[in-house]
Amino acid sequence: MRRTRQRSLKPSPPIAACAPDSLAIFLDLDGTLVDIADKPSGIALGDPLRGLLDRLQQRTNGALALISGRSIDDLDGHLRPLTLPVAGQHGLERRNASGIRRAASGRDLLEPARLAIDRLLHRHPDVFVEEKGLSLAVHYRNRPVLASWLHRSLRELVGGFPNQLALQRGKRVIEIKLAGADKGAAIAAFLDEPPFRGRRPVFIGDDSTDEHGFAIVNASHGISVKVGAGNTAARYRLPDVGAVVAWLSAIAEGTP
């Protein structure tokens, strides 16, 4: 996938020429709407952010979805009492605007991988494994020196399950997940359904895990936004979480 450095995106055209009810807005969570925490449980969605998402949901007539590496249950726990369409675990599970929930099959394939990871990490307690149901996230934020070894070891592990398991790299995390799903496919599925169908897609994300989503949005003549530095396929850029919240607030208030 081709990635290029892009210019900044501010609350100005092309959004200014688009009414919110003409947009389908897709948002990553960690590193996009909230700062990344040392552990996944450490993030905090305050009432102001939930209120912003609620306003966006109303302004877009429901065409707002979260596209995350977290599980749907995890996302719901942070969003409550707000309920949104969501894609969890990089698209392995998805709940549409009608509340219908679907998930990939083959969860049992992860068990041998989990046992192998336990053996691999028994001498590295600072590296922890997050079990999401359809994927395993190996977080090495506390031991970044192990990055090369972990990438090599987990690549070899996944190689033993061709066409069944896949590796997903992120910011100081490596995920082993069931093959055949990504954030781009999840966005494409939403765009085939109401109320997202026929709208101009917007996707904001911060990590390499979001690149498939950027590609789908670009192909749909939408607005792809990378948060932070780094090469990307996204066409626009915002510097940090604060800038994302300000940009979305301008849309929600009708003052882009």
Image (spheres, grey):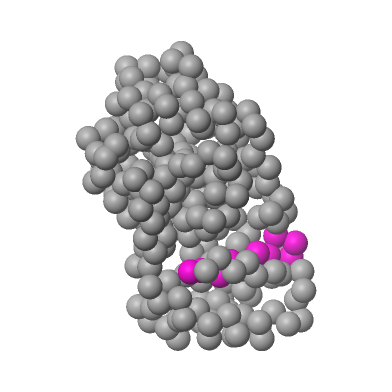
Residue 142 forms part of the magenta stretch = yes
Tell me: 228 left or right of 122. Answer: left
Task: Name the image quarter holding residue 203.
Answer: top left
Q: Where residue 17 sits: x, y (%)?
A: 32, 17
How many numbered discs sit on the rendered protein? 0
Seen at 63% across and 59% down, the residue is 172
- Give 209 or 81, whichever is nearer the viewer: 81
Seen at 50% across and 30% down, the residue is 54
Q: Quadrant of the C terminus?
A: top left
- Give 26 or 143, whichever is nearer the viewer: 26
Tell me: 50 left or right of 64. Answer: right
- Give 98 or 206, whichever is nearer the viewer: 98
Q: Quadrant of the N terminus?
A: bottom left
Q: Does the rendering let one see residue 228?
A: no
- Give 17 or 172, whichever is nearer the viewer: 17
In the image, residue 148 sits, relative to residue 83, either above or below, namely below
Q: Where residue 134 sits: x, y (%)?
A: 48, 69
Seen at 66% across and 82% down, the residue is 118
In the image, residue 239 sits, relative to residue 20, either above or below, namely below
In the image, residue 175 sits, relative to residue 28, either above or below, namely below
Q: Where residue 185 sits: x, y (%)?
A: 32, 55
Q: Where residue 237 sits: x, y (%)?
A: 48, 34
Residue 49 forms part of the magenta stretch = no
- Segment colored magenta: 134-143
In the image, residue 166 sits, relative to residue 55, either above or below, namely below
